[in-house]
Amino acid sequence: MENKIYSTLLPEKMIDDLRELAYLTRRKQAEYVRRALEAYIPHELSTARIQAGVKKRMAEREAETNR
């Protein structure tokens, strides 16, 4: 419903730009979180299993936001 309202009020180009900005913001936030985790997790715990779990959760969140 919201998208329908916005699409009638804003030009299509502006909507596309806002979507792009939201996507880039989410990616930047994910990068900050990744760096923070790397800084606080001891090196011995930073295994492929943990990294795979983080990537999986990030992919799930991105898929959820892209719906």
Image (cartoon, grey):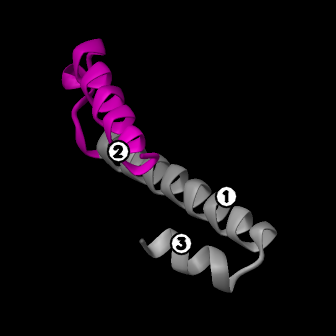
Dot in front, 3 or 2: 3
Q: Is residue 3 above or below residue 63?
A: below
Q: Secondary structure at mark 2?
A: helix
Name which residue lies at 28% across and 35% down. Answer: 57
Q: Residues within 10 Å of mark 2 (few under 14, many from 20)?
A: few
- Front-most of residues 60 and 51: 60
- Image quarter of residue 20: bottom right
Q: Is residue 17 left or right of residue 6?
A: right
Q: Is residue 5 left or right of residue 34?
A: right
Tell me the tag on residue 28: none
Q: Are marks 2 and 1 in contact (CB under 8 Å)?
A: no
- Front-most of residues 9 and 52: 9
Q: Is residue 41 left or right of residue 21?
A: left
Place of residue 26 in the rendered image (x, y in percent of width and height, measured from the top left): 49, 55
Name which residue lies at 48% across and 47% down. Answer: 31
Q: Disc 3 versus disc 2: distance between alpha carbons? A: 19 Å
Which residues are drawn in magenta? 40-67
> Residue 8 lies in magenta, yes or no?
no
Dot in front, 1 or 3: 3
Which residue was labeled with disc 1?
20
Which residue was labeled with disc 2?
64
Q: Amino acid at mark 3?
A: Lys
User: Which secondary structure type mostly characterizes the magenta part of the structure?
Assistant: helix
Which residue was labeled with disc 3?
4
Sequence-wise, the earlier of marks 3 and 2 is 3
